[in-house]
Amino acid sequence: MNASFPTPGADATQRLLSHEELEAALRDIGARRYHNLHPFHRLLHDGKLSKDQVRAWALNRYYYQAMIPVKDAAVLARLPDASLRRIWRQRIVDHDGDHEGDGGIERWLKLAEGVGFARDYVLSTKGILSATRFSVDAYVHFVSERSLLEAIASSLTEMFSPTIISERVAGMLKNYDFITKETLAYFDKRLTQAPRDADFALDYVKHHATTPELQRAAMDALTFKCNVLWTQLDALYFAYVAPGLVPPDAWQPGEGLA
Amino acid sequence: MNASFPTPGADATQRLLSHEELEAALRDIGARRYHNLHPFHRLLHDGKLSKDQVRAWALNRYYYQAMIPVKDAAVLARLPDASLRRIWRQRIVDHDGDHEGDGGIERWLKLAEGVGFARDYVLSTKGILSATRFSVDAYVHFVSERSLLEAIASSLTEMFSPTIISERVAGMLKNYDFITKETLAYFDKRLTQAPRDADFALDYVKHHATTPELQRAAMDALTFKCNVLWTQLDALYFAYVAPGLVPPDAWQPGEGLA
């Protein structure tokens, strides 16, 4: 449904890029638009946010976490053979876990509880911003509606996540007395999971983006995903930092706490 | 995909509402969350926006206008009989017109050109905010994925549009020397089209929301649609009013003008 996408460095696709050039072009997209560059993340990592502002981030980001395995199941359903599905299904295992109380979603719930939320309030997703819901749902729809190459390329933000995670964990532990190592356990796992997933996706994209047009589509898919992440932080900043206009029904400080 | 929706006045659905009570409950949703209450609209109507801020609104709102007949085609495809489709298809005719240069989308393009944009730039939707795209696409997905009752109920914001349109046209003509009656021609038509459409949709909802649960679903669908409109103005305010952080690739003043 997305009529068009921004095409940064469109000139980069006048010819077929080598695998190395394509990887460099993809990394360049991250260097210019990954959400570690967003002012909200700088405030978060530098300890400039209030506890309520960190809560707003944890609450909204939960919806993203909770929908990731739904997104990956949509991709899984489109993979043509068992060897690919065996690899991709690990992402769902990582987020959903092997038993009650296990997995990435559960670890994010622990993070939300760690900053004071009642578990059921977080699970209800009642207080999240509509912009969070629309952005995350756009990602799930994208991987269902676009080509498999675009669906897989859109996951490549994981190439950039180790950096932001180490920044975030160090910064948050250092700057917020209400954040503990246990609260941030989610990120420990991601430090090993994300690179493994990104390596596979990058290799797939390199070998399936076999024309300049397909390479452009893969780059645009990664740009789209960067926008999905960026837009969520824009909305958090707008509602909870400045000008601080919380939309109707979105979480208000004090609500949903344990 | 939307795990849950805010349920304002959920108590209102402890029992089956009469048609009059249901209409009152729906109008109450508009009275509390329709986007005429958004600070961006107040600035727009009171003449407090710069020409570039009005341009940002016209450019982004174009994507909403352009997707409305796509949304209505998705609803049309779900209507079970010819008598209903004959009525609903008029919405598509209104927006797409009967010939080149006719219809609501064309009139919105005229509005965008009237504030200085090059037609092709607007048509490309390149400069719109990702939040605009995600919000509008959420609406199109909603009417495809939810029940027919919810799809039709989500259109009921048209019950509230005559008020905002008269405010807007009067306010903009009075306050902006760069806005002419011709520029705003889009809204003249909507003053007769919207009430006709809303009357049909309201009657449909009254007669098909036959349980407290279905009445709740219809109210939540209207709330969702109010959020689709509200979120677009949040993003415009954030990027172009305050704090004024334009996301990567979104329109920058000076771009795309004729």
Image (tube, coloured by chain):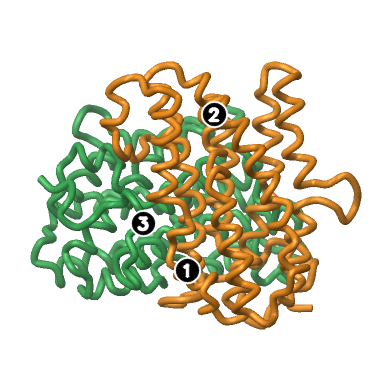
Chain colours: A green, B orange
Asked whether the residues under marks 1 and 3 belong to the same chain, the reply is no
- The label on residue A77 is 2
**In the image, residue A105 above or below residue A198:** above
- The label on residue A247 is 3
* Amino acid type of the residue that numbered disc 3 sits on in the rendered structure: Pro
> In the shown orientation, is residue A162 left or right of residue B160?
left
Residue drawn at x 15%, y 43% as measured from the top left: A118
Q: Position of residue A4 (x, y in %)?
A: 69, 56
* Amino acid type of the residue that numbered disc 1 sits on in the rendered structure: Arg
Of all chains, the one bearing label 1 is: B
Asked whether the residues under marks 1 and 2 belong to the same chain, the reply is no
Quarter placement of the N terminus of chain B: top left
Residue drawn at x 48%, y 56% as measured from the top left: B35
Q: State the residue position of label 1.
A: B42
> In the shown orientation, is residue A114 left or right of residue B29?
left
Of all chains, the one bearing label 3 is: A
Query: Tag 3: Cα neighbours inside 10 Å, few (<14), some, or many (≥20)?
Result: many
Q: Position of residue A139 (x, y in %)?
A: 51, 46
Alpha carbon separation for disc pair 3 and 2: 36 Å
Q: Residue furthest right?
A: B99
